[in-house]
Image: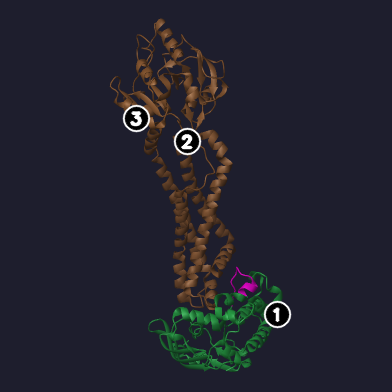
Chain colours: A green, B brown
Amino acid sequence: MSVRDARRGTTGPAVAIRDLRFSYVPGHEVIDLPALEFARGETVFLHGPSGSGKTTLLGLIAGVLTPQVGQLAILGTDLTTLSRGARDRFRAAHLGYVFQMFNLIPYLTVRENITLPCRLSADRRARVTDPDAAARVLADRLEIAPLLEARVTALSVGQQQRVAVARALIGAPALIVCDEPTSALDADRRDRFLELLFANVAEAESTLLFVSHDLSLAGRFDRTLALRELNRAAATGGV
Amino acid sequence: MLLLSLAWRSLRNRAVITGLTLVSIALSVALLVGIEHIRRGVRESFAGTIKGTDLIVGARGGTTQVLLSTVFGMSTPTGSVSWATYERWRAHPAVRWTIPYVLGDAHQGHRVIGTTAEFFSRYRFRDRSVTFAAGGPPETDREVAIGAEVAERLGYTLGREVVLAHGVAAVSFAEHTAHPFVVRGIIARTFTPIDRALYVTLDGLTAMHAAEEGAGGLMMGPPSPHTEGPAPITAFLVGTKNRFETLQLQREMNEDRTEPLTAIIPGVALGQLWQTIGSAEVGLRVVAALTLVVGLIGMCVALFASLESRRREMAILRAVGAGPRTIVALLVLESGVLATLAAGLGVALVYGGILVARGAVEARFGIALTMQALGTTEWLYLGLIVIAGTLVGLLPAWRAYRNALTDGLSPSL
């Protein structure tokens, strides 16, 4: 465990899942995961084609969905024991999330989008001395510094995704979750995006969980997991 | 603070929809508050129809009838009061001044009132006295002063000869042609029934009817046939020396057995009359309230419609750590902000409207619209509007709450 993790006030592996089951409709399980665990600081590539339950699994890890059965510990905290409000606060404090696309609040500027977590979470706010300065540093590293005061609607998809990464990283949360962040980017932009993502995740000493159906990206990560093999519900459901 | 700024930015982002919703609610707010304002103005104008007169006295009859026949020139007088009785009350120690009224003749559908110089010096409406746009009060038995509306409608100017007729019908076959009058003065517009009447002296009426009889007149003459002494009058207005003696004097008059009279206090009688005719305003208020309901439903619809396109935005907020309650709070705040702005804009519209239109409204309808502060009723309305507007936001917020729980971080788009 790094010094920074200690400062974040969490212990234990980044994600620890055991016998996790989830269904939206009773009797139709979408997730049936016997075991899944990865350590702090790992970069994990989770290969999940559509229908493998990846979006649901990310919702569970983010604490937005509640599992019916099983253990789900994030950064040593068992989410299943937390109330809904406590999970929301935990997510705000310790998780950075990047969507496939449309990551940004349209009526806020780039800077305001990046600093949004600091305004919603006291923990995230406490870890940066000045949110605006932190946003500038991240924007600089992600090569979007000139866009800070721009309207997000004026941004290209690639720029939007970088802004989303900056927002996920501000206040250095312990876990960064990316849900197919590169699927809307062409090859050149995708490579540059990944380079910047890796560099900044390493700088923040965060754990990276990267979900994609594009196996060609897997080589860059510490570990590759195939959700279809792990998730028994996906296997039995058969696609 | 964050939520308020988010709500504000979000509303501004949807400027067109927000603006249209705002305008529609503000217009209904303006309607509601404006009607209340105008209602107050009308009531005050109405209550100001006659001021400074402590008692109106007529032959025994209904309160409303005495009021209508003397002040408004409507309805038929209750009868007549003998000159002796009038003289007796005029000499009463509590009485400071009196204005006699003799009704019963007309000119082109306009009432003719026989009165004395007291009328021009003592009569008050809305704390103003009768003034002349041209000329002056009738002095001889051949002179007449006409109201502003009479002058305008009939196109009369000073010096014009006027023939009065018996009865109040617009077309009368019993014209007092033997004794024509000359317009001596045109009374400045008062926005009271004075504008629609003609004023002659008591001597003028007597002379006119005498001339008629001498010429073998067609009709029975003035309100009541008389044989000796001055003619009876129809009613008289009384100003007391001391307001506190008014009630006592009223009781004395009503209980007097020499000649049965009805003495009314104008303010009280006007209030009672307003109670009966004022119920029309309820209909106006209901219409205004319905408009407001439509406006609020429009806001609800607009918020609902925006929800679909905002599911992504909600998911982002959720991902960044906002709870479902924060989402609810955001939407309720948006509708609350919108309702508050609309209420403010509505009030601004009312005052702006008054500023622009008050001259025209006063000139046309005699309703004095003032820039007075909002009354309790108006504040109550505004409070209710803001509360209702905020509550309306709960409906889409509830939907968003459900969406937030089921969508998780992946709205089905």
Q: Nearer the viewer, residue B93 or B331?
A: B93
Residue A126 visible within the image:
yes
Q: Is residue B299 above or below residue B119?
A: below
| Residue drawn where x is 49% and y is 72% of the image | B326
- Amino acid type assigned to the residue bearing label 3 in the image: Gln
Residue B45's tag is: 2
Q: Quadrant of the N terminus of chain B?
A: bottom right
Measure the alpha-carbon separation of dots 1 and 2: 71 Å
Chain ID, mark 3: B
**Residue A181 in sight:** no
Q: Chain of mark 2?
A: B
Q: Where is mark 3, residue-wise?
A: B248
Are the residues under marks 1 and 3 on the same chain?
A: no
Answer above or below: position of B32 versus B339.
above
* CA distance separating discs 3 and 2: 28 Å
Question: In this rendering, would B53 be left or right of A154?
Answer: left
Q: Which residue is mark 1?
A: A140
The prevailing secondary structure element of the residues shown in magenta is loop
Q: Nearer the viewer, mark 3 or mark 2?
A: 3
Residue A14 sits in which quadrant?
A: bottom right
Label 2 CA crowd tier, 10 Å (few <14, some 14–19, many 20+): many
Mark nearer the viewer, 1 or 2: 2
Q: Position of residue A148 (x, y in %)?
A: 68, 73
Dot 1 falls on which chain? A
Image coordinates for residue A197, horizontal then vertical, percent: 64, 85
